[in-house]
Amino acid sequence: MNRSIYFLVFLLLSILYQQYELYATSITVSGNSGSTYYLFDQSLNELDSEIINGFIEVTAGTYIVKLNNCYKQVSINDGDNLIIKTARLCVLGQNNKWFYVYKNPKLEYLTASRTNSSVDLLEGKYIIKINNTFYTITLSEEQNIQIQPEIIKVLGTGLDTYYVYDNNMNELARSVTNTELGIFPGEYFVKLNNTIKKISVEPNQRYIIKSGTITVTGTGRTEYYVFYDTRTFNIYNNILDNSFKDMKIALNTSINSLKIAAGMDDKPNISSNSYSNFLNLKQLKNRKTNESVELFPGDYLIMLNKTFITANVQEGQNTIVKSSTASISGKGNSAFYVYDLSYNLLQSASTNDQVELFPGEYVFKLNNTYQTEKVLEGQNKFVKSGTLLVSGYTGTPCYVYDIDKNEQLCSASINQQIEIFPGNYVLKLRNSFINATVNWDQTTIIKTGTMIVSGISGKFYVYDCLNYNQVAYSSVNQKIDLLPGNYIVNYNKKSQVINITEEKDAELNFQ
């Protein structure tokens, strides 16, 4: 009896031992991260999965291990505990950027992680990408690799964005100035507000690019625009090896010749006021006056209300370009216009409003009267006008003429002010004329008188006494305005002479 019990116990222990032996075989992927690895059979049927450093019990055979989309085929015998050791990869960097791991040049994606974080990979060859730049690396078991990308940083105000391109002008990365970008070695273009710099990034290099700024002082209300100057554009065109032919500008080539001939080639600010010479410019950036634009060093052309000035930008410096303002005194009732000396329209505003301009000589137009003025750097040019007013009773229109050319300049109704530059003019009311002189900051008032013809019905006609030219006509019993003087009035085939005096009412009765 005891023998039977011993035999059964022995048999049970043998079975348990065999089962233990059957499951003692295992596969472990060891590493440092908390990633999951997967186990497949040779037909890629998933069998099990486990966190790194955890083991999977298997039977003897051939398996495929997958970690972060990397595959490795392994064989194991009964009783073996196979440990597959990984490599640890970390890409260093700031700003919590992502880096990506690919299998081959076809860029078959494997995994990704934040910079300064590690990923576990099986041994093999990989392609690492950060900011669309690539680096090839071969990893061995138990390696702990830290990759430090090269650093690009554009120094500036932190207000503008710079871009990194490859040689085919594909955008790779962007960031604001004063912020670093990690990239792998290679040839690149860096663009800041459409200004371009070509760089060659070598291993173990920190590439710092210094920008400069342009600030156009002013009221803060007007947009100014930055363009390539001829010299700067030629330099960039050579650097880019014709990559940016679409940015070519058709500047008048005489600008630089004039600078050199005048001995002004090295001066930072050269004025040029002919808008017609700059119609094909390629705009780089625009800002309002008193705001800055970040640019790479070079010579630039700045436009403010279609007036131009050149400016040189140097590394780490803020180039201050002083603008000027021009305004025309008045009541704010009329528009004035600013032209260059070739009579190209630059800008318009209402009287008493300011127009921002670069220094130069300009033509101002107010109600078809003209005045040429020089505007100096930083100056608030105040161009004085005068006003002309015809006072009277009715709303009859009156007209202002050039005294020399006899051309009509402007018109207004009686009792409405006409803003005009100082000078001598001819005023027309109905069909009578009078000379008028307008002075600075003064209102010239032409006073009329009124006349009324009493009658039952019909019209009366008014003629001047000198040439008997018809001056006006109206219905009886209606008051009309006339310039002071003697007139002949006809009504019902009868005539009378009447004297019109300022601010007096005259009445005729033909009965």
Image (cartoon, grey):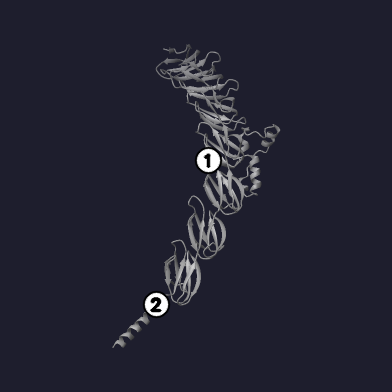
Q: Which mark is residue 157?
A: 1
Q: Quadrant of the C terminus?
A: top left
**Residue 62 visible in the snapshot:** yes
The CA distance from mark 1 to mark 2 is 70 Å
Q: Amino acid at mark 1?
A: Thr
Quarter occupied by the N terminus: bottom left
The percent position of residue 132, horizontal first and vertical second, equals 54, 55
Farthest residue to the right: give it.
261
Residue at the front extreme, as displayed: 2
Nearer to the camera, 143 or 274: 143
Q: Is residue 100 above or below residue 507?
A: below
Q: How far from the left and from the top, in percent, is residue 442?
A: 51, 17
The circle drawn on residue 12 is none
Please indicate whether residue 459 sits to the left or right of residue 302 in the image: left
Q: Which residue is mark 2?
A: 20
384 versus 321 height, above or below: above
**In which quarter of the view is residue 346 placed?**
top right
Q: Do tag 1 and tag 2 residues touch (Cβ < 8 Å)?
A: no
Q: Amino acid at mark 2?
A: Tyr
Height in image: 381 above or below 211? above
What residue sits 63% from the left and 34% below the top?
Answer: 268
* Tally of numbered tags: 2
Residue 432 percent location from the top left of the image: 52, 18
Name the element at disc 2.
helix
The residue lying toward the viewer, choosing from 17 and 408, is: 17
